[in-house]
Image (cartoon, rainbow, N blue to C red):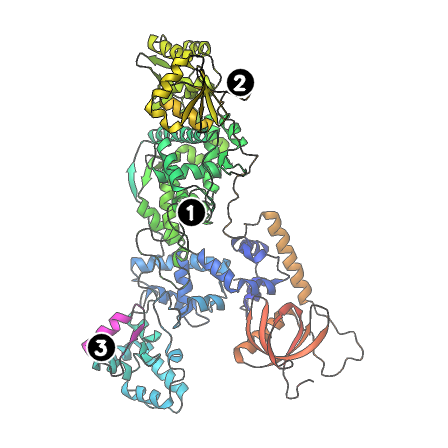
């Protein structure tokens, strides 16, 4: 490592690093920068805190984690050869004849150790590798939390508190000579279990049933329950120390014995190499790009339809937030998609800033002003806007329909849908797709296996087993949702990553839009009118044409061509929007490549002739018409009973229904009424009149501290170096009358080392302390725990347990025979 003297602490190891290495540590573990450490000692202390170590362990791949787990059950410090033997097994880590698995482990181990060193989880030379204490506590076995390796405690740990007489009985049963003290007895028993020859001889004498018991415990969990009068095979194992008591009903297989039975391996299946991605299909890359572009265009059309659907005010917001199940079902029916797919489009539009709540008293969802700007963009730019928003969004549509931790249903646009891991998983899934040649669609299950290898602890946390096969863990479910959503959005085509998506990931939105533009058909300025009152759009239409046609006709079917149908209701809708019959005839004649069919002309003229013949206003509501016969017909119709009409004058009917209900009721009866204002003018209904105030898209919830940029890293490293130099500088006592026996000042490194040693040995120390008000005092404390820049100790001076910040301790010294007063 470039030094002749091995480092004695993590702080010394970090101090020996170069600036680039320190910057790499802070980049990999940005939580260490909040705030910037004062010096190297504080950086090392912070790197050893539980929360930071857990976060670092969660970012390790499978083999780096297995390496750390092997170090957790190895002696501290552990030579490189010992670590290699724990990973490869006896006889596979030395010289020729190692099998392919052993060779792969031998080749991958230096890289895994480099990763652990860079993350400050391991320090020291290869002759003595140290796993940081917190990581050892998290990964080492204990009765409360079994080791991920399935190994139990050592003989020394399992026999702690056992009577000397019982130890001698075990030695005698195992064929070992008696010893004079418990320490040598434990050493003799451990020596037996680690001696390959003697251990084999002992097991040769074991009953077959006893070997079966060992087989059940050898790969974990190492604990088993026993009765007060155990069976003879279990008793045989207990007599010889192969099973040691943990409690009156629990026994454990000691680590040394388990390693012998495992042929020296810490893991049943070491995984030094990531699982390979398997191709499910290979397709023409150009066909993939065309399929993805077509699906991307369909995505744009679907989002446009959603905005149009909620154009004049969308569904109301639930009291708890979000969209009701009924409204989601209604929206899915209007978009002609399933409810989960509709939820995805709604959440995507929300993440892209195109939908939001209007903030009114009767709060509803509606398009935002940004949606109008988005609609004016070219198709390729609209697609990159949606794709970029999807990549960065932490809101996870796949959770909709499930339940939160309190058993409450998760609704679309509701709370508790943010999952901070979603952006990383999406990008990683697409990056794995990009590893394959263009046009190759990977098998999703191999993608899941690769993700689990890269982040195994994200499944269950330190000390817990990985999730079984399938997609039970959140990251796997997000990965499967990513595969489906990428196909819906046009990121992938026919299961393979498109070239425009590759450009989006590697070069940015502008290059992706340039790749996509040639694949999107040019919008058309015409339709084909049919004699059956339909219009066929053979491709995408220009926006003004599409908007007007959507008002004048109803969409009957979509696909390669869109079919619109003209109905009395659709024509009336156009008239309600302020269009005259002459305007509609001119519009159709201008934009149709075929002659306007006579039935369509008659339909428009007939609806226009009757439009506004009836007038509805607010009195509760009233109907007026110059033709008394029409009003008589309405009164005679049984369908008008629910409107509760009565005649006020020969040309006026009053109703107890509100104007809107009256308007809809008469339209359902086949009439074409028009609403009028209090002044008697016809009210014109214009689409797209409701918009929210300016809204910003939802901010993604970060998974942790942001990754610092180069400028911040450079400044932080300089500050840490400067603080470390100042802390280690020698400060001479300028007082000419320094009292003999006064407490000397110590550096932060000396202070930390002294209190840590006192905590391990249970001894008391003498400290100088300055409180927050600046008052100095001297105290005698017995440290119990040192973590996170604080020391928790029993204060003999105050006769209570207190916690002291290490940076406020000015000096520390071991107690002499004569304690200070």
Q: Position of residue 232 (x, y in %)?
A: 21, 82
Q: Nearer the viewer, residue 746 or 614?
A: 614
Q: Circle 3 is placed at which residue position?
A: 210
Q: Secondary structure at mark 1?
A: helix
Is residue 230 something one can see in this rendering?
Answer: yes
Q: Position of residue 511 (x, y in %)?
A: 48, 31
Q: Is residue 782 left or right of residue 424?
A: right
Q: Circle 1 is placed at which residue position?
A: 425
Say which residue appears at 53% left-offset and 36% top-offset.
358
Q: Circle 2 is placed at which residue position?
A: 680
Say which residue appears at 34% left-offset and 65% top-offset.
93
Mark 3 or mark 2, earlier in chain: 3
Q: Residues within 10 Å of mark 2 (few under 14, many from 20)?
A: few
Q: Residues within 10 Å of mark 1 (few under 14, many from 20)?
A: many
Q: Which residues are magenta?
A: 207-229
* Tags 1 and 3 touching, CB below 8 Å: no
Mark 1 or mark 3, earlier in chain: 3
Q: CA distance from mark 1 to mark 3?
A: 47 Å
Say which residue appears at 63% left-offset and 83% top-offset.
815
Q: Residue furthest left?
A: 208
Q: CA distance from mark 2 to mark 1?
A: 60 Å
Q: Is residue 425 magenta?
A: no
Report the quarter where the C terminus lies: bottom right
Q: Position of residue 702 (x, y in %)?
A: 51, 49
Q: Nearer the viewer, residue 495 or 355?
A: 355
Q: Secondary structure at mark 3?
A: helix
């Amino acid at each position: 490592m470039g030094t002749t003297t091995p480092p004695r602490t993590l702080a010394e190891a970090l101090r020996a690093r170069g600036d680039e290495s320190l910057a790499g540590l802070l980049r990999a573990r940005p939580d260490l920068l909040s705030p910037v450490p004062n010096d190297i000692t504080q950086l090392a202390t912070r790197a050893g805190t539980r929360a930071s170590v857990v976060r670092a362990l969660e970012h390790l791949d499978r083999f780096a984690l297995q390496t750390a787990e092997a170090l957790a059950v190895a002696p501290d410090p552990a030579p490189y050869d010992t670590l290699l033997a724990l990973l490869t097994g006896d006889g596979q880590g030395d010289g020729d004849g190692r099998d392919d698995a052993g060779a792969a482990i031998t080749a991958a181990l230096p890289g895994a150790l480099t990763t652990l060193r860079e993350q400050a989880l391991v320090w020291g030379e290869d002759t003595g590798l140290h796993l940081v204490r917190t990581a050892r506590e998290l990964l080492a076995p204990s009765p409360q939390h079994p080791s991920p390796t399935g190994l139990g405690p050592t003989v020394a740990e399992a026999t702690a508190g056992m009577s000397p007489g019982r130890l001698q009985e075990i030695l005698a049963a195992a064929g070992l000579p008696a010893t004079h003290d418990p320490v040598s007895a434990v050493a003799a028993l451990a020596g037996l279990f680690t001696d390959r020859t003697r251990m084999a001889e002992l097991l040769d004498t074991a009953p077959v049933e006893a070997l079966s018991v060992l087989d059940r415990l050898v790969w974990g969990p190492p604990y088993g329950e026993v009765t007060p009068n155990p069976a003879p095979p279990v008793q045989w194992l207990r007599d010889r120390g192969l099973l040691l008591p943990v409690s009156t009903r629990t026994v454990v297989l000691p680590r040394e014995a388990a390693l012998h039975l495992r042929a020296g391996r810490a893991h049943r299946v070491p995984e030094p190499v990531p699982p390979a991605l398997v191709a499910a299909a290979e397709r023409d890359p150009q066909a993939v790009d065309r399929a993805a572009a077509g699906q991307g265009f369909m995505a744009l059309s679907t989002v446009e339809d959603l905005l149009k659907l909620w154009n004049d005010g969308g569904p109301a917001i639930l009291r708890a937030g979000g969209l009701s199940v009924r409204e989601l079902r209604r929206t899915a029916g209007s978009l002609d998609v399933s409810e989960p797919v509709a939820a995805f489009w709604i959440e995507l539009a929300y993440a892209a800033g195109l939908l939001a709540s209007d903030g009114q008293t009767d709060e509803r969802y509606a398009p935002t002003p940004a949606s109008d700007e988005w609609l004016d963009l070219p198709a390729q730019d609209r697609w990159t806007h949606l794709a970029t928003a999807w990549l960065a969004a932490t809101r996870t549509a796949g959770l909709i329909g499930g339940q939160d931790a309190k058993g409450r249903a998760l609704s679309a646009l509701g709370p508790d849908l943010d999952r901070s891991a979603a952006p990383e998983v999406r990008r990683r899934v697409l990056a794995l797709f990009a590893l394959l040649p263009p046009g190759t669609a990977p098998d999703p299950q191999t993608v899941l296996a690769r993700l689990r290898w890269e982040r195994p602890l994200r499944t269950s946390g330190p000390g817990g087993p990985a999730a079984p096969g399938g997609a039970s863990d959140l990251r796997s479910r997000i990965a499967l949702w990513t595969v489906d959503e990428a196909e819906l959005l046009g990121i992938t085509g026919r299961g393979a990553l498109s070239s425009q998506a590759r450009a989006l990931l590697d070069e940015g939105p502008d290059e992706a839009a340039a790749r996509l533009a040639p694949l999107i058909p040019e919008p058309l300025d015409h339709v084909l009118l049919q004699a059956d009152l339909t219009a066929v759009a053979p491709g995408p239409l220009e926006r003004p044409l599409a908007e007007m046609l959507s008002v004048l006709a109803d969409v009957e079917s979509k696909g390669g061509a869109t079919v619109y149908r003209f109905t009395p209701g659709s024509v009336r809708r156009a008239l309600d929007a302020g269009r005259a019959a002459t305007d509609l005839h001119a519009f159709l004649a201008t934009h149709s490549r075929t002659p306007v069919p006579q039935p369509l002309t008659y339909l428009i003229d007939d609806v226009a002739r009757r439009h506004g013949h009836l007038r509805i206003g607010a009195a509760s509501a009233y109907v007026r018409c110059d033709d008394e016969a029409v009003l008589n017909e309405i009164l005679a119709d049984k369908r008008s009973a629910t409107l509760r009409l009565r005649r006020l004058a020969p040309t006026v009917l009053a109703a107890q229904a509100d104007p809107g209900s009256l308007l809809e009721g008469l339209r359902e009866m086949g009439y074409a009424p028009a609403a009028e204002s209090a002044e008697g003018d016809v009210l014109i209904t214009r689409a797209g009149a409701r918009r929210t105030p300016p809204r910003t898209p939802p901010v993604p919830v970060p998974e942790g501290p942001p990754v610092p940029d180069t400028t911040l890293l450079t400044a932080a490293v300089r500050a840490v170096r400067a603080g470390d130099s100042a802390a280690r500088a020698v400060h001479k006592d300028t007082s000419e009358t320094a009292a003999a026996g006064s407490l000397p000042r110590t550096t932060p490194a000396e202070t930390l080392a002294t209190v840590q040693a006192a905590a391990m040995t249970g001894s008391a120390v003498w400290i100088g302390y300055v409180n927050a008000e600046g008052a100095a005092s001297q105290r005698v404390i017995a440290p119990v725990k040192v973590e996170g820049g604080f020391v928790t100790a029993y204060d003999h001076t105050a006769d209570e347990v207190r916690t002291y910040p290490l940076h406020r301790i000015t000096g520390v010294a071991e107690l002499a025979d004569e304690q200070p007063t």
